[in-house]
């Protein structure tokens, strides 16, 4: 009990530190936080890129914005080396500073859409069975593909999504590890 209390206190202290080190704005009804390392772009440029990405989502798939408002606690731009985007345990859509600074609004928007699918599937604290991780990742990639086909200059988004969808289950969902992934009625997917 004391350990859990200490973890809660430490977590709240860390959240307060992050909140004070971040700049926050509201975009499309969502909190957007930027904790900028200033290695790749100004904080203003980061906010502008996220705003442009969300504007694209709202323009071509407006029905996604409402669920994101409910499912994301925030969009959080911070250094996250090696990962473009992720949905974390605090329900944040985390975007890497390098990714936001150097990639197009369409690519940033597609990652927000991708993480929005993860968020929707995890709504209410649900977890995905390990043997469905590849199915979930393919669902996210299909959402990216649909988004990329609708946005101007979405060629890079479409190419990345199509390439990912062509991968084997183990490659599309490497975090699944060595588990045996669920087979479909048609049989296992072949690479």
Image (cartoon, grey):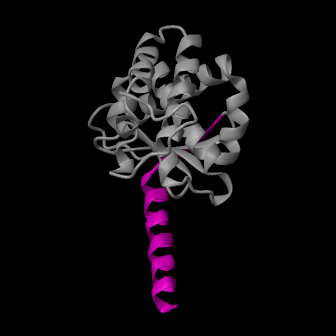
Residue 127: percent from the left, percent from the top? 57, 56
Q: Is residue 85 visible?
A: yes
Q: Which residues are magenta?
A: 1-27
State the image coordinates of residue 164 (x, y, percent, origin top left): 40, 26
Q: Is residue 41 left or right of residue 14?
A: left
Number of numbered discs present? 0
User: Between 140 and 13, which is closer to the camera in this rendering?
Assistant: 140
Q: Is residue 72 visible?
A: no
Kindly identify the residue that appears in the image at 53 percent across and 58 percent down: 90
Question: Which residue is depicted at the point 68% across and 31% down?
Answer: 64
Q: Quadrant of residue 66?
A: top right
Which residue sits at x=64%, y=44%?
Answer: 120
Residue drawn where x is 34% and y is 36% of the image: 171
Q: Residue furthest bottom?
A: 2
Residue 41 against residue 127 in the figure, above or below: above
Position of residue 102 relative to residue 116, above or below, is above
Q: Is residue 117 magenta?
A: no
Please state if 39 lies on the left or on the right of 109 as rendered.
left
x, y (%) of residue 39? 26, 37
């Amino acid at each position: 009990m004391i350990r859990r209390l200490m973890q809660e206190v430490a977590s709240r202290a860390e959240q307060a530190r992050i909140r004070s080190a971040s700049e926050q704005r509201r975009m499309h009804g969502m909190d957007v936080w930027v904790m900028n390392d200033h290695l790749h772009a100004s904080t203003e440029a980061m906010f502008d890129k996220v705003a442009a990405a969300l504007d694209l989502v709202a323009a071509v798939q407006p029905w996604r914005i409402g669920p994101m408002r409910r499912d994301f606690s925030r969009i959080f731009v911070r250094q996250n080396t090696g990962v473009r985007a992720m949905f974390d345990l605090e329900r944040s859509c985390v975007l890497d500073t390098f990714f936001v600074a150097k990639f197009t609004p369409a690519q940033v928007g597609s990652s927000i859409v991708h993480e929005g699918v993860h968020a929707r599937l995890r709504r209410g604290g649900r977890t995905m069975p390990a043997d469905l991780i590849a199915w979930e990742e393919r669902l996210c990639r299909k959402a990216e593909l649909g988004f990329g086909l609708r946005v101007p200059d979405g060629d890079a988004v479409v190419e990345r999504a199509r390439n990912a969808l062509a991968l084997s289950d183990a490659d599309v969902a490497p975090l699944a590890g060595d588990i045996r992934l669920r087979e479909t009625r048609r049989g296992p997917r072949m690479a």
